[in-house]
Image (cartoon, rainbow, N blue to C red):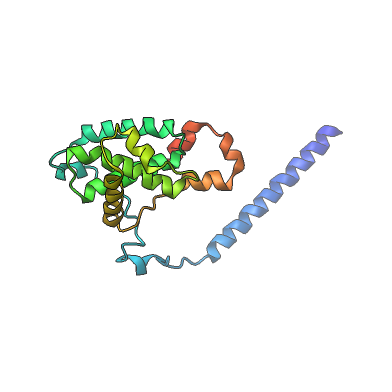
């Protein structure tokens, strides 16, 4: 009795699936493809609307006094400083992005490279952090190689060079702020999401 009942139910399910497939085929035939409207076409020449945070992979070629290895050493040191100050991951990514865009647009002397790094950290902290390290802390961490006045002058130069456009893709911020349960995700997954570009 149970077998016959189960077979009858399976037959009904198969019939219903066939009816659904026929309805889908009818619906698909009724669909008329419309051209896709490019909603960003009016912004094609607006530099503020475009994502200008991408730099050429070989932008360091234009630098005469510094090279890729020096930049890598700077970023490694800044990562250590970043963890010492217990800053958010977003701050680190923004800081490196600011450095890359600035170096792509401005020639920097070797003796000023660390100054660019700590100033980029200051700007990224102002953008992302609730509690920002004081300028005095940043030039102390650099071994007092620069004065407060030099840090503030470099901050002005970086902001003007970037034309106050320090925004980057913020997938990690959106994931953390929208989904409280994503905080429990593996830290590696969150880092990959943030730095996928």
Q: Residue at x 70, y 49 (%)?
A: 15
Q: Where does residue 34 sit, x and y in percent of width and height? A: 45, 68
Q: Is residue 38 above or below residue 128?
A: below
Q: Which residue is the extreme one toward the bottom?
A: 42
Q: Which residue is the extreme one toward the right?
A: 1
Q: Where does residue 36 sit, x and y in percent of width and height? A: 42, 65
Given residues 172 and 23, the one toward you in this image is 172
Given residues 96 and 123, the one toward you in this image is 123
Could one spot residue 196 in this view of the protein?
no
Residue 9 image-quadrant placement:
top right
Position of 11 with respect to 84 (left or right) is right
Residue 117 image-quadrant placement:
top left
Q: Residue at x 43, y 49 (%)?
A: 127
Given residues 140 and 6, the one toward you in this image is 140
Q: Residue at x 23, y 46 (%)?
A: 103
Position of 124 with respect to 113 (left or right) is right
Q: Where does residue 44 sit, x and y in percent of width and height? A: 32, 65
Q: Where does residue 57 sit, x and y in percent of width and height? A: 24, 43
Position of 97 with respect to 9 (left or right) is left
Quadrant occupied by the C terminus? top left
Could one spot residue 82 in this view of the protein?
yes
Given residues 101 and 138, the one toward you in this image is 138
Quadrant occupied by the N terminus? top right
Q: Is residue 24 above or below residue 3?
A: below
Position of 109 with respect to 23 (left or right) is left
The total of numbered circles placed on residues is: 0
């Amino acid at each position: 009795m149970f077998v016959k009942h189960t077979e009858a139910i399976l037959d009904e399910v198969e019939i219903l699936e066939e009816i659904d497939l026929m309805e889908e085929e009818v619906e698909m035939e009724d669909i008329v493809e419309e051209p896709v409207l490019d909603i960003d076409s009016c912004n094609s020449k607006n530099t503020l609307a475009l994502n200008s945070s991408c730099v050429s992979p070989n932008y360091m070629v234009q630098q005469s006094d510094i090279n890729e290895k020096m930049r890598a050493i700077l970023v490694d040191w800044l990562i250590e400083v970043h963890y010492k100050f217990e800053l958010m991951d977003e701050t680190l990514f923004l800081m490196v992005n600011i450095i890359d865009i600035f170096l792509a647009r401005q020639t920097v002397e070797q003796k000023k490279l660390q100054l660019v790094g700590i100033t980029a950290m200051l700007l990224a902290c102002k953008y992302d952090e609730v509690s920002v390290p004081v300028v005095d802390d940043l030039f102390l961490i650099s071994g007092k190689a620069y004065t407060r006045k030099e840090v503030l002058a470099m901050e002005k130069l970086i902001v003007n060079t970037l034309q106050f456009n320090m925004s980057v893709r913020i997938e990690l911020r959106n994931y953390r702020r929208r989904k409280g349960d994503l905080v429990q995700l593996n830290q590696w997954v969150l880092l990959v999401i943030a730095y996928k570009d």
